[in-house]
Amino acid sequence: MGKKQDYFVGVDLGGTKLLAVVFDEEYTALGRAKEKVAKSRDNEAVLEKMVEVIRDALDDAGAKPEEISAIGIACPGPVDFENGIVLETPNLGLENFPIRDRLSAELDVPVFLENDVNAGTYGEYVSGAGRGFRHIVGLFPGTGLGGGLILDGRLFRGATGGAGEIGHMIIQVDGRRCGCGQYGCLEAMASRTAIAKDLVALATTGSAPTVYKKAGSDYAAMKSSVIEKGWREGEPAVVDLVNRAARHLGIGMANCVNIFNPELIIIGGGLVEKLGAPYIEQAEHAMREHAMGRLVSIVSVKQAELGDDSTVIGAAALAREHQS
Amino acid sequence: MGKKQDYFVGVDLGGTKLLAVVFDEEYTALGRAKEKVAKSRDNEAVLEKMVEVIRDALDDAGAKPEEISAIGIACPGPVDFENGIVLETPNLGLENFPIRDRLSAELDVPVFLENDVNAGTYGEYVSGAGRGFRHIVGLFPGTGLGGGLILDGRLFRGATGGAGEIGHMIIQVDGRRCGCGQYGCLEAMASRTAIAKDLVALATTGSAPTVYKKAGSDYAAMKSSVIEKGWREGEPAVVDLVNRAARHLGIGMANCVNIFNPELIIIGGGLVEKLGAPYIEQAEHAMREHAMGRLVSIVSVKQAELGDDSTVIGAAALAREHQS
């Protein structure tokens, strides 16, 4: 308490960008900085850039390093949060990097590390759509389908920090191939990827002209914005595929209702930001059709409110609580 | 602490029987009593019989009513554990019965009410296969498929006490019809019921002669012991159906691994007691094939150890903890 200010920094180490935001105790953003990062497999280079981005964010906030109480880092892929080690980042190529202790030594501030989906769910819990709820399931369909769990008011991590892989819950035995190598995972049935796989084939048949015009039949070009375009134009093939994905998402939500008996399901991520309320309503409709009546009757469904900032807010909040 | 002894009573109010067991502090059974109960929709008659069975169990234990510290009641179907109210028992026909307060007034002892699958999982946790583990998923395939969750060393109930309905996790969109009215629930794909549905049809074709000899094509007669008989005889059609159910159970287990990141999965219930280790090994094999490597590598699978007593032990243990 020798400090005049208690600031917290959240850092989102994404696959292609590094974002640092300085927050006050109410999680108001006071300053921010962003940098591109390339896949380098170079732990030291990433650390150096992280220090730079944090300093830039502090400058932007007009804050001094000694005013920071804690830094939270969120990164994709599995982490060892107890020891602050990045185990593996699919895109950046980091491996077994003790980023917590390294960054802490560099800046002389307590650092906390968490997986990005957990951090994002926690951010929505402390400062977004989840405020006031104690039992929350967060689902974030995009390229993958991330899941985060707030149970009894706490981030639930399971035995070794890996809980919440709801995207890899199989909802269709021997169903569509998933990026993880299994078949029929929720991610393979409900994410942007699930839609894109069918769209590339449909596009070549002339059934989705708006999409074809924007992206051809190139899978890599089938971004959420392209899907949104075809969907807003009311192109029947695109509408049908989006509806199917929404129904599958709703079935995944229903499973979560039956398993966790939550009060709230938060839906966020890239696809949801593009397709918005009508998409969520469809998923919610399917959820209410497929879950047990006495459990689903107490569940609310809300869209995530914080966008990309949920991750940095959650990382900062977790760092703050861990350090206190 | 005015008592010479601290005894705990667990009561299992099943669909057809009432079992009461008196335990000491180490959950050693000191005495027990059992009675049949008929579907009566008569709350008062059930209460009266419960008092009688508890008194008989005390007699059997040579214990006095004043030596009981707490009574735990486990019953099927949803309960309001906070208020000690049986909401609904599918077989007995009880409805909205405040059994906790009524029994407590009758015997002048603190009473605690819990759902039977939760109690059974908790019993295995405190005194059976789950001792020493803190993150446990219990799965009990039989007529239905019950699920119980121990998370961070505590029974997990969710927002309104209904969590753990793992049997109604959909693993096959638009799959087999489930008793709950949905399609493709784990229960509909992996329980005794799932096997029995196919067996009745197969039996009429002559493909399962051992089964046909014992049960004809009568669905109601397709008990676990009949399935066991055909399976032990190595009847290909029966072996195939059991293998399929075990694989589906394993996929359900894999989903639990990915979602909860548990240390232990306990498999119990009627079907498992009949088919034993080979059946569990098959399910475990499928689980290891379908779950994420880094999560499944830390999971053990064990058969439940306590049989029917898991429920009374768990009920007694929960009553004890709730009261202390």
Image: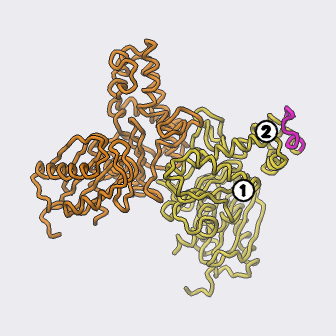
Chain colours: A yellow, B orange
Quadrant position of residue B300 = top left
So how many labels did they put on this image?
2
Q: Nearer the viewer, residue A247 or B260?
A: A247
Q: Residue at x 41, y 48 (%)?
A: B148
Quadrant position of residue A97 = bottom right
Quadrant housing the C terminus of chain B? bottom left
Q: Which residue is mark 1?
A: A277
Tag shown at residue B66: none
Which amino acid type is shown beneath numbered disc 1?
Answer: Ala
Tag shown at residue A199: 2
Q: Position of residue B229 (x, y in %)?
A: 33, 21
Q: Residue at x 37, y 55 (%)?
A: B96
Q: Are marks 2 and 1 on the same chain?
A: yes
Which amino acid type is shown beneath numbered disc 2?
Answer: Leu
Q: Residue at x 77, y 43 (%)?
A: A239
Prevailing SS of the magenta stretch? helix
How far separated are the C-alphas under marks 2 and 1? 22 Å
What range of the chain is rendered magenta? A204-213
Query: In this view of the protein, can residue B229 be seen by the observer?
Result: yes
Return the disc, 2 or 1, that comes first in the chain's sequence: 2
Category of crowding for the residue at label 1, using alpha-carbon neighbours closer than 10 angstroms: few (below 14), some (14–19), many (at least 20): few
Question: Does the magenta segment cover residue A210?
Answer: yes
Q: Residue at x 80, y 43 (%)?
A: A220
Mark 2 chain: A
Secondary structure under badge 2? helix
